[in-house]
Image (cartoon, rainbow, N blue to C red):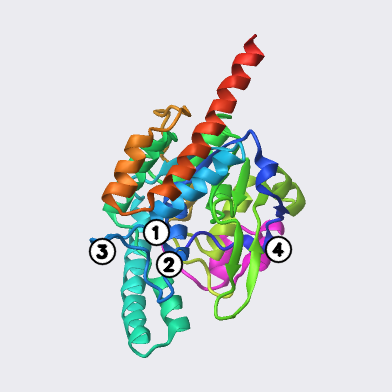
Amino acid sequence: MGVGIGKIIPKEEKTLKSFKGRKIAIDAYNTLYQFLSIIRQRNGEPLKDSQGRITSHLSGLLYRTGKLIENDIKPVYVFDGEPPELKKGELEQRKEKREEARKKFKKALKKGKKKEAMKQAQKSTKLEENMVKSAKQLLKAMKIPQVQAPGEGEAQAAYICKKGHVWGASSQDYDSLLYGTPKLIRNLTITGKRKIPNKDKYKEIKPELINLEKTLEELEINQEQLIEIGILTGTDYNKGIKGIGPKTALKRIKKGKKLEEIYEKEEKEPETDLNKLKQLFKEPRTTNDYELKWEKPDPEKIIELLVEEHDFSENRVQRVIKKLQQKLNEETTQTHLEKF
């Protein structure tokens, strides 16, 4: 779900070339969900191998990561760990919604309603443990660094960015801002033409850059107030107050209203301790146990995983491998010349 503050956040439209030479921490779960949702067959079903195993996430990971490397962008994928206790209720609700969407998908498919089937198929997207495992195997073979977060992947990505080990953090959700990432990049792994839901039209999806410092200056608030606005509109840990959107929340917070006062005025009882909720964003669980190192890919391992195990086209996979090798060779040559 993420936090619903997008309407008040200033964004700057960019191109992939804008991030040339940048190291970017990518929220892995968020990205894999995007691949599973977008990369589908015409009937709404995800891509599968001959054994019926879903491969949409691997397809997206291979080609999109290859495209980033082609554009001189160095990605590092950050994987979620154990979710906070407060999130478990939200996760259970998501599970129920996915199951309901799956039922609607099957009904729509039987009736030949392709648009409805696709819509419900995307809502039923689920990231299984085996998918995460295969994604990590592919990244290892591609020699793309990955970080295992102890808690939320977005929080860890924000932490790596604040440390200055990467230039920015990439996610579709705005939670990264609440965790304090200096720079948030949206749409990084889903650039290109995308079909508008329920319409026979397409739109161009371009990367968006959000600078936290500039955002706070423009909104005339501080980081804690941004967190409070997020809590009022709803996060992965709470539903917020119905009827209060980001613009209303911003106005009330800027007037100096405290969270407790706003809840009391609206005659709403907080679902959880508001101070603990704020603390989840201010001091999330993170780790220093990571190494960011980009090396030449292992072609044999990539072919073994994608072609031999999951029936990918060898020619297409080889083309990506060749581009990865070429780009990394260029970097090595450039580094040697600079030293000389």
Q: Earlier in the sequence, mark 4 or mark 3?
A: 3
> Label 3 is placed on what type of residue?
Gly
* Residues tagged 2 and 1 counted as in contact (Cβ below 8 A): yes
Residue name at image x 36 percent, y 50 percent? 84
Across and down, in percent, residue 92 comes to 32, 65
The residue identified by callout 4 is 251
Q: Which region is colored magenta?
A: 244-272
Along the horizontal axis of the image, is 238 left or right of 192? left
**Element under disc 2:** loop
Q: Earlier in the sequence, mark 3 or mark 2?
A: 2
Q: Residues within 10 Å of mark 2 (few under 14, many from 20)?
A: some
Q: CA distance from mark 4 to mark 1?
A: 42 Å
The residue identified by callout 3 is 52
Q: Residues within 10 Å of mark 4 (few under 14, many from 20)?
A: few
Residue 40's tag is 2
Q: CA distance from mark 3 to mark 2?
A: 14 Å
Along the horizontal axis of the image, is 321 left or right of 8? left
**Element under disc 3:** loop
Residue 56's tag is 1
Which residue extends farthest left? 51
Q: Earlier in the sequence, mark 2 or mark 1?
A: 2
Q: Earlier in the sequence, mark 4 or mark 1?
A: 1
* Residues tagged 4 and 3 counted as in contact (Cβ below 8 A): no
Across and down, in percent, residue 189 comes to 54, 52
Residue 291's tag is none
